[in-house]
Image: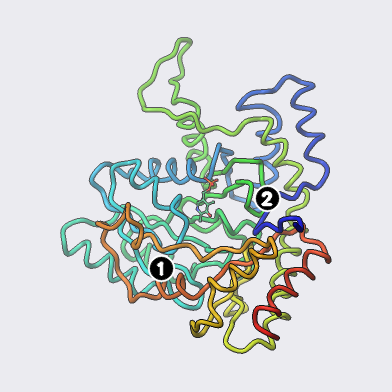
Amino acid sequence: MKDKIYLSSPHMGGAEEQYVKAAFETNWIAPLGPNVSGFEESIEKYLGDGNFVAALSSGTAAIHLALIIIGVKPGDEVICQSMTFSASANPIAYLGATPVFVDSESETWNINPVYLEEAINDRIAKGKKPKAIVAVHLYGMPYNVDVIKKISKKYDIPVVEDSAEALGSMYKGRKCGSFGDLSILSFNGNKIITTSGGGALVSRRQEQKDKAVFLATQARDDAPYYQHSHIGYNYRLSNVCAGIGRGQMERLDDHVELRRKMNIFYRDIFKDIQGVQVFKESSDDVKSNHWLSCILFDQITPERNPDGLREALLAENIESRPLWKPMHLQPIFKDSPYYGDGTSESLFKSGLCLPSGSNLDNIERARISKAILTYFNA
Ligand SMILES: *Cc1c(COP(=O)(O)O)cnc(C)c1O
């Protein structure tokens, strides 16, 4: 059997081990230390002036804390992009609030501004103004930042920018992760950079970062003994993992370029295959990191369909995956309100994510190319 080609696997650059070794040598084997602050500083520098970063144990933890800082309480409603990974929506449920799902637009696959506004107005008419909007840059493709921000301002509802898949993506020359009232990043093993597991909350205000760190370290009051006036969490990033992150940050620009090259690789393969589109930027305002390269089938036939291609790749030990199944179609969220026209459902049925790692070599690319061309008899 040929070696497995993964959808997106960790890609170490070399410096990671030195930072981890330094953690051992100085005995900073704890959820704080020089790697944690160094990692935070390197992300702040990358995102630009005015961004404050709290390194956390996961992106999910970051969304949870963002919603707490915004003030989401049991019984509240929070709007969430339906087409996303469940981690965008789960923290809403952790807080005893109800997610209200909004469909995708076809250009970016992200939250549709028309249905977003319809949802807000309808929820207000039903007596409950939503407390927050969770908007996602899916697969690294930026959502329509200006329009979403305008709606957020008009109704005075803060945006949580889920940038878990979009570190290195840009909108109008600015980096994703710097747009929401609060933003989150993920450093899970499959993301564009990894700490093996980790995440961050990004804010434009120092006091929000301080609040996140306070909540993430068990919410201890300023007293010599353990005193608590808030419910706390154990959500801080380990200094050992942060060492991996510092090494990864040195390679982030390379990773983005390599993932973008994978997208061009697929555009080359599919340019002569009728009826299949490679997902790409629909305007010069945006630059995707192409965390995952995805394709869409114009039509589903017995000979040509996403599941058939997935099986054909699997037979060559190449991993691919259907697009995220929308949250309003998930059994656990079946009772949550949804606003849309079925766009995300149709994307889910006609799309496929292809291997997109920054560490795929020429031999692996040749295997992928051959398997795809064979499936399409091209
Ligand atoms: C990965 C991911 C998350 C969660 O990040 P973790 O670090 O895995 O907790 C949240 N939202 C989206 C869109 C993601 O892809």
Q: Quadrant of the N terminus?
A: bottom right
Q: Using residue 325 as the reference point, say whether residue 122 is left or right of it.
A: left
The residue lying toward the viewer, choosing from 333 and 88, is 333
Residue matched to label 1: 150
Verify CB contact (< 8 Å) between mark 1 and mark 2: no
200 displayed left or right of 194: left
Q: How many marks?
A: 2
**The quarter of the displayed image where residue 53 is located:** top right
Amino acid type of the residue that numbered disc 1 sits on in the rendered structure: Lys
Amino acid type indicated by mark 2: Ile
Residue beneath label 2, please?
A: 193
Along the polypeptide, which appears first: circle 1 or circle 2?
1
Quadrant of the rendering where the C terminus is positioned: bottom right
Q: Viewer-nearest of labels 1 and 2?
A: 2
Q: How is the image coloured?
A: rainbow
Looking at the image, is 25 positioned above or below residue 374? above
State the SS at label 1: helix
- Residue 243's place in the image compared with 193, above or below, is above
**Assess mark 2: CB under 8 A from ligand 1?**
no
